[in-house]
């Protein structure tokens, strides 16, 4: 992976940090995206120390803000002329219903709209690569997901897991629709479930009981971040998946996603709705 430019959102913590370290060990140029300057600097130090690779840089952006994603894209374009791998990994859960500055429910804003906008704005640079891979970190939670476009902007029986499952279903639908749109190009796009991983995702934006529940559950049953990063690293670097696109992976193996995730009409509707609420131009 030497000299490959890899962008990893949420590369300062959890699965994203472990993915960054593993890909830095393979010699790639690593660019993490973090919403916090101090956390980004700390993560860069960790990635350099753990990998011995000094080609590690960061961008600061709040991915739930479309303005911030657009600014990030300009900064990336100033820094490099080619993006070889984009890993959309940053995500979150939100106990309470909140709207982003763009008027979008925060779970779908962070977990879907950031993937949608960043990917589309970087496509020009990704197409210039002879490697050209997009990886969307989804979740097995998508199997329970249902799409309700009204909930993107309105409070409708809000529940943390319902919103999260919907956003992760959106990741797989977006992946599949993008793969259709990229047919005939050199760009591949795949989605994945990282496993149930010991990170702090469930401790953020949490109530005391959901915080406690996540801490106990991850202590008892979750895999390490290194193991959780394996499928992202595989899709980002393995020659085995060179010509694979529009697929969903779990434990570095292709897996059938939920029937709804394979609904082409729903994928097209999601794309249309996403463009309305988040113009690409
Ligand atoms: N952990 C699991 O069991 C599990 C299972 C299935 C899927 N996933 C998926 O894996 C991905 C990574 O999650 P994780 O478990 O590694 O969680 P994590 O440790 O909380 O990492 C999430 C990363 O995303 C960043 N992030 C969140 N909101 C952001 C925003 N608005 N702008 C910029 N960065 C933002 C976080 O930044 P901060 O450090 O500033 O919070 C952090 O770097 C997510 O897409 C998640 O849905 C995780």
Image (spheres, grey):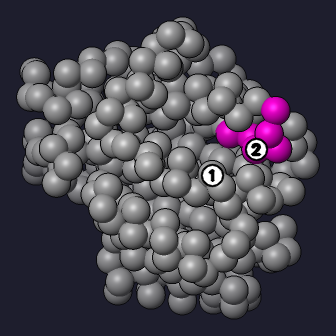
Say which mark, if any, is on residue 123: 1
Taking the spot 56% from the left edge, 63% from the top edge, the residue there is 8
Q: Is residue 111 shown to the viewer in this render?
A: no
Q: Nearer the viewer, residue 121 or 196?
A: 121
- Front-lying residue, 95 or 210: 95
Q: Residue at x 24, y 56 (%)?
A: 204
Label 1 Cα crowd, 10 Å radius (few <14 / some 14-19 / many 20+): some
Occupied quadrant, residue 25: bottom right
Q: Is residue 18 above or below residue 133?
A: below
- Whether residue 185 appears in magenta in the rendering, the answer is yes
The residue depicted at 20 percent of the width and 41 percent of the height is: 104
Asked whether disc 2 touches disc 1, contact meaning CB atoms under 8 Å apart, the reply is yes
Task: Residue 152 in the image: state x and y as whole percent.
Answer: 23, 31
Front residue of this view, candidates 198 and 29 = 29
Mark 1: secondary structure: helix
Magenta region, main secondary structure? loop
Q: Residue at x 87, y 37 (%)?
A: 243
Judged from the image, the secondary structure of the residue bearing numbered disc 2 is loop
Q: Where does residue 86 sit, x and y in percent of width and height?
A: 63, 56
Screen quadrant of the N terminus: bottom right
Give the percent coordinates (x, y) of residue 250.
Answer: 65, 33
In which quarter of the view is residue 94 placed? top left
Residue extent of the magenta highlight: 184-189
């Amino acid at each position: 992976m030497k000299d490959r430019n890899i962008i990893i959102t949420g590369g300062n913590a959890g699965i994203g940090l472990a993915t960054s370290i593993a890909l830095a060990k393979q010699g790639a140029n690593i660019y993490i995206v973090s919403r916090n300057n101090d956390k980004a600097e700390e993560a860069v130090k960790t990635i350099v120390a753990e990998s011995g690779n000094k080609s590690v840089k960061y961008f600061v952006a709040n991915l739930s803000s479309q303005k911030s994603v657009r600014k990030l894209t300009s900064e990336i374009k100033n820094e490099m002329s080619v993006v070889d791998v984009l890993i959309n990994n940053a995500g979150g859960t939100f106990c309470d219903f909140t709207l982003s500055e763009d008027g979008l429910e925060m779970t779908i804003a962070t977990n879907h709209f950031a993937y949608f906008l960043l990917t589309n704005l970087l496509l020009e640079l990704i197409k210039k690569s002879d490697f050209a891979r997009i990886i969307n970190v989804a979740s097995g939670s998508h199997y329970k997901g249902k799409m309700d476009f009204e909930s993107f902007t309105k409070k409708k029986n809000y529940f943390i897991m319902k919103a999260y499952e919907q956003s992760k279903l959106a990741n797989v639908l977006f992946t599949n629709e993008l793969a259709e749109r990229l047919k005939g190009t050199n760009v591949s796009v795949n989605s994945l479930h990282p496993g149930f991983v010991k990170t702090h995702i469930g401790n953020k934006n949490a109530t005391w009981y959901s915080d406690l529940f996540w801490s106990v559950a991850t202590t008892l049953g979750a895999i390490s971040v290194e193991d959780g990063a394996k499928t992202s690293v595989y899709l980002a670097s393995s020659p085995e998946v060179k010509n694979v696109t529009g697929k969903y992976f779990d434990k570095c193996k292709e897996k059938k996603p939920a029937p709804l995730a394979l609904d082409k009409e729903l994928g097209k509707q999601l794309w249309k709705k996403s463009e309305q609420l988040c113009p690409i131009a």
